[in-house]
Amino acid sequence: MSSLQLTDFSDRFPPMLVKELRQGLRAKTFIGVFLALQIFLAVMLFSASAASNSDQVGGIVSGVLFGFFAIAVIVVQPLRGTNALAAEIKGQTIDMMVLTRLSAWRIVFGKWFAIVSQSALLLSAIIPYLILRYFLGGMNLVGEIVFLFLLFLTSMGITAVTVGLSGCTSVIVRSLLPVIGLPFLAYILLMLSFSGAMGGGNSLIEICALDSTESRIGVLCYILAIIYLSYSLLSMGASLIAPAAENHSAVRRLLALALLAATAFSGFFELLDEAPTIILICLIAIPAVIIALVESGPLVQTVRRPFEKFGPPGKLLGHFLYPTWSSGVFFAVILTILAIISIFGHGLLIPGSTTMLRDFFSSSDADDKVIVFAIAGGFFFPALWQMIFFRGEGQRVANYLLILTGSYVLLGVLSALTNAMESSIFLLFFAWNPLVFLPIMDEGSFRDSTLLVAILFIVSLTFLALLLGAIRHAGSQHIGIDESEPTPPQAD
Amino acid sequence: MSALKVSNLYRTFGKLKAVNGVSFEIPHGAVCGFVGANGAGKTTTMRIIASLDYPTLGKAEVCGINVVHHPAEVRKLIGWMPDHFGNYEHMTVLEYLDFYARALGYKGAERRQRIEEVMDFTDLGPLASRFSNKLSKGMTQRLGLGRALLHDPQVLIMDEPAAGLDPKARVELKHLIRVLAEEGKTIFISSHILSELGEMCDSLLFINEGRIVHHGDAESLKTGSDAVGGLLYDVQVEGDPQAVSDWCVLQPNVEFLETRKQGGRIRIQSDETGAAADVLARMIKDHLRVTEYHREQRNLEDAFIDILGRLDQGQPAVPPPLPTPPSNN
């Protein structure tokens, strides 16, 4: 039976990676992209080497090289992840995987890592061309290498988004990703890399040269943000396919809280400037809140037990860390409140420093506060709609994302109408959606302080309704699964 | 301790009660058939036992281990074969089994040995280098069985394994299940094809609308006290076959069961063989041109229909306890 032995991958490789690489390296998409990239780059470099003004040509070569590499790793490769988990769910193969020793996290991580490994193969394939391009002159060596690395890192992040969301079985949601998100992203990256290559002012390549402290902090923050976002999305994917006994939410939520606390601490002591603090808080809080609001797991004793060991404090903590919808709502509300305090409390612990938190209801900076509350409320509004109109546990992610998308489409339409029409009083009819306060404020018919009170009222109402729903849901979960000595429910 | 024990199991999806208070036990080494119409709750019950779903209420145990509390331990004990599973693109049969063996924690020589053993058992050796998504249904089922057996589970849960198989593949699968049963594995198998289950299983569980409506072994279902009385006869006539059913409507104690080629199947509500002669005499007297008239054995389909019929008439279904199978150990 020696002919039956497989020697392509060592035992040390994770099973999911072995499986995905065996399949992925034979996939037409990967082979096509790999060969096309090689042929294109070879032809381009051959043509460029014959050109007379090599310094200028070098810049153009870099731009084109990065542009096509970006399309390959930021558009094509992540697209392969959009069906990664959905195909396993549809084919019922996910059940068979779950029955092995593979945890939901290892399944999702393996899927992601396999696509990223193939992107790394593409990266290694363009390195010889980069070396050749060096001899054309005009190369910002550190800048271009760091930029290439960041492109690859971005690819890892977007792949995590597509793989994580691929656990959502809704075809509409998975189609929205490539149809809307990826071409938009590719366009931005192409524009940025081309403008950089053509010698545009403060280009990305120049930032990537890490000449200043700001650029070094910026790149470091970007790397950390991508790692955090990738982890969050992959962990969400794991939650979507995990059996009832696995709790992936607790670690994810605790990590978000820890990162938010660290950022808030830096902000309170002015260790970080206000703008990067706000950006970091948004990067940490937004994915954590969205993921918490779409949780739909059941509450089984295996999940409850580790918390119940610590008595009433443990039980209370559990209500924020269980992988259930109600716990997700409790956590999301708390995290949002903490994030808002962190945003407005910059410099709070520096004596003599003025903060927006200290004079919250004064008219100064009321517009900033309206924007923050409108955006924060905008993430809770779809959860409220979902609670009212889509009561089932299934398709929670899909429903939320579709309502959120619809909400932003409505915002776009209303903004356009406001610009086109003289009167904007009609906007008040849509003020139940916190996002609509953005065009209302932009239009300027109302005082900012009045709008601040109004948005606080709407957001508080949204929070209250969600919390009431969540309390009711949490109560029903306590009688949900009782595996001890069940009393059968009344027959119809 | 039972191999499988299910107590007061409920599973609801919204307002739908997919499983509605199911309780049963299956002893070690038994082969138990799970019978029910589409949507009766078979797959949901099996998925809960396999730790792939969770109960709304109630408890399921495999070898005494709670499937909700300790899914990882349960998974070491069970082999799960779903009714349908998609195969992977660009992956050969050998690579497929290699992946699952790796995922189950087997390494090096031990992994190769396990793969060889299941390939020998399921006769997949000649197909080793064929892409798994290019296999026929029968071959796919053998591959699925091979995968389910990789970790040598004590309990095998098979959901409609024979669905869509051609007769040859069905015979092969039946043979493999028999061999596994002889090795002492507990097998819990669902199927629509009752005659096959009757041949393979020590006992049968009938489920209807999420409730267990009958336990019993195949023989007692055909002949025992659970059987609805009466004599079953196949009647073939010359001319219009409809005449048989029309005639039955007018007869007391004669029930028309199903239409066949030139007549149909009837039940005579009497246990005396003389009654059959009387019925034949009446048919001839009423000018039915009978060309064939012979007695048939009551089969499992009849038993199933009888049980459902009794439920329709409002008679409570009180399942008797499962018989203990002869121990293989």
Image (cartoon, rainbow, N blue to C red):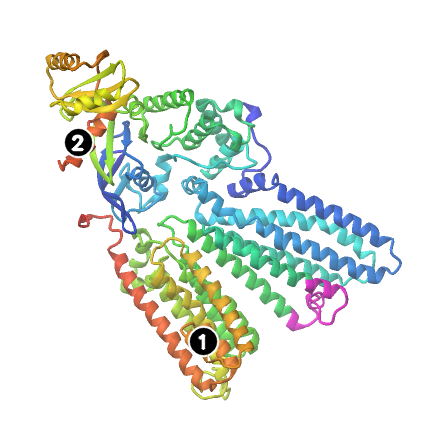
As displayed, is residue A344 above or below residue A89?
below
SS state under label 1: helix
Which quadrant of the figure has residue A67? bottom right
Reading the image, the residue beneath label 2 is B321
Residue type at mark 2: give it. Answer: Pro
Chain letter, disc 1 residue: A
Predominant SS along the magenta part: helix
Q: Position of residue A99 (x, y in %)?
A: 40, 40
Residue A450 within the magenta-colored segment of the rendering: no
Chain letter, disc 2 residue: B
Q: Residues within 10 Å of mark 1 (few under 14, many from 20)?
A: many
Residue type at mark 1: give it. Answer: Phe
As displayed, is residue B325 above or below residue A373?
above
Looking at the image, residue A488 sits to the left or right of residue A301; the answer is left
Residue found 38% across the figure and 29% down from its top: B163
Q: State the residue in front, B309 or A478.
A: B309
As displayed, is residue A469 above or below residue B190?
below
Q: State the residue in front, B54 or A68.
A: A68
Looking at the image, residue B292 sits to the left or right of residue B103; the answer is left
Q: Position of residue B119 (x, y in %)?
A: 47, 25
Q: Read off the magenta span.
A: A191-215
SS state under label 2: loop
Residue A373 marker? 1
